[in-house]
Image (cartoon, rainbow, N blue to C red):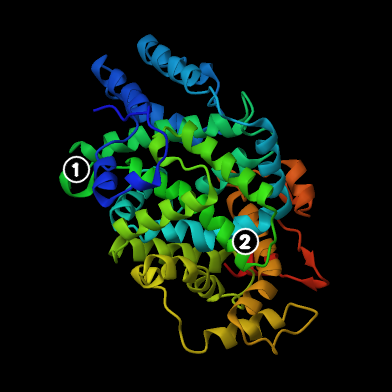
Amino acid sequence: MTTSHANSFSLEVITNDFLEEKRKHSDPIADEVITQIITSGNEEKVNDVFLKLVTNESYHPEMFRDLPEEVFQTITRYFNCTSVLPSWANTDKVKTGEMVFSLFGPEIFMLLNVLSLPMCYTCHKGAKVLYMTGRLSDRKGNMDPLTRRLMETAQMVVNAMSPGGLAPGGSGIITLQKVRLIHASIRYFLKHEKFNPHGWDVDVLGEPINQEDLAGTLMSFGPIILNGLKNLNVELTNDQREAYLHCWRIIGYLMGIDPALLPETEKDNWELAVKILRHQSAQSLEGEELTRSCITFIDTIMPGTVFNGVSEYMMWFFFKDMSAATGIDLASTIGVTERSGVKEMVVMAISKFLSKKISHLQDHSQIIQAASGLFNKLLLHGYLKHYNGGKNIHFFIPPSLCKDWNIAEEWQNKFFLTPNIWGNRIAWQQKQDRN
């Protein structure tokens, strides 16, 4: 059944039965591309298409020229027809949303890692897909596939929210088009015994990367991020908040999400997030392992060991509002709890790097706000160093955002430099040598 795109969003129709029905639907436009490749007798080329998409930073038609003509034409038609913005897209709002990202990108980037993605891991059925597809992403064994997904997601957000990313031909639109095809390829792999001998139970789990899971992920990048910014004491105007969500509504449209799952107002965005989490959140081993992998990765790319445990503490803190809204202890579903003495450990750790001591702070929110400015910059630098250090994929931040975020351009190429933050030198190279 083709997902309907005729209905606009209405909170009243978002019931558990409605969400359960949406789990039966995926992305017919992207899925049709994969189907056409298979039915044309080129089943073995699905893997070639998948690998070209995940290993190339951009799209140009000629990258598929070596494939059979039918496959080449099918993919070319797909990229042509899915590049059109919705009729309701507002250029002024998009520019305002991009400005929010340029002003608070480091904070948003940090929240992506300690709030948005871990929140997705609480959805136990969707976590199974994320866990299993991590094993499909890297065939050469040169990177932990679960941490590679962190980079790919971060790159998608940067491309989509950078200036011009959502303009016709923008890098964000191209990235989203590629992600849709990657999702369709993953659905094909998971549902075919040849690639997944364990099988995929559609009746129990729904379609892999289905409409509900796509909408839930979108909400984690939209209203949940805005709530995280509020907890960081970042004050946005109503116009800025509306514009930021408008960008993500466009992103959802370009990702093939049913308009019935694309709310416009902040209230409806938040309520949809609550309803989806109530419907899907539960403890799972996959969710716990994904979370543990995320925490371990962050600990690894931060300098030394003094920040170990900070990311988990942040996850626990930033989950509190959504846990209260849903009535579910969401952090516990992914194995994150308030541990005795962690707050004091974080205070001591961060105080070592701040010129102004924070040992007097007692409230969790004050501690997080004091720590985040340092933590988010180090996290960005850590991403650049880790993913750009001689690997076959790269994490790229446009020069304009590097300037806005005070990231030295030489970080793009000279990864041995030691950053100087607030007069405190961080021994990145020393840690690398120890590894």
Q: Which mark is residue 202?
A: 1
Q: Is residue 356 left or right of residue 292?
A: right
**The disc labelled 1 sits on which kind of residue?**
Val
Residue 197 pos. (x, y %): 18, 44
**The disc labelled 2 sits on which kind of residue?**
Leu
Question: Residue 139's quadrant in the figure?
Answer: top left
Question: Secondary structure beneath disc 1?
Answer: helix
Q: Determine whether label 2 and label 1 are within 8 Å by CB.
A: no
Between disc 2 and disc 1, the foreground one is: 2
| Residue 147 vertical position relative to residue 291 in the rendered view, above or below | above
Question: Secondary structure beneath disc 2?
Answer: helix
Of the pair 171 and 5, the residue shown nearer to us:
5
Q: Which quarter of the rendering shows the N terminus?
A: top left
Residue 320 pos. (x, y %): 48, 71
Q: Is residue 265 left or right of residue 90?
A: left
Q: Residue at x 34, y 57 (%)?
A: 123
Residue 210 pos. (x, y %): 32, 41
Work out which residue is located at the far front of the displayed protein and give it.
12
Q: Is residue 384 left or right of residue 329?
A: right
| Residue 304 vertical position relative to residue 63 in the rendered view, above or below | below
Are there few (<14), some (14-19), or many (20+) residues within 10 Å of tag 1? few
Q: Which quarter of the rendering shows the C terminus?
A: bottom right
Q: Is residue 197 visible?
A: no
Q: Which residue is mark 2?
A: 229
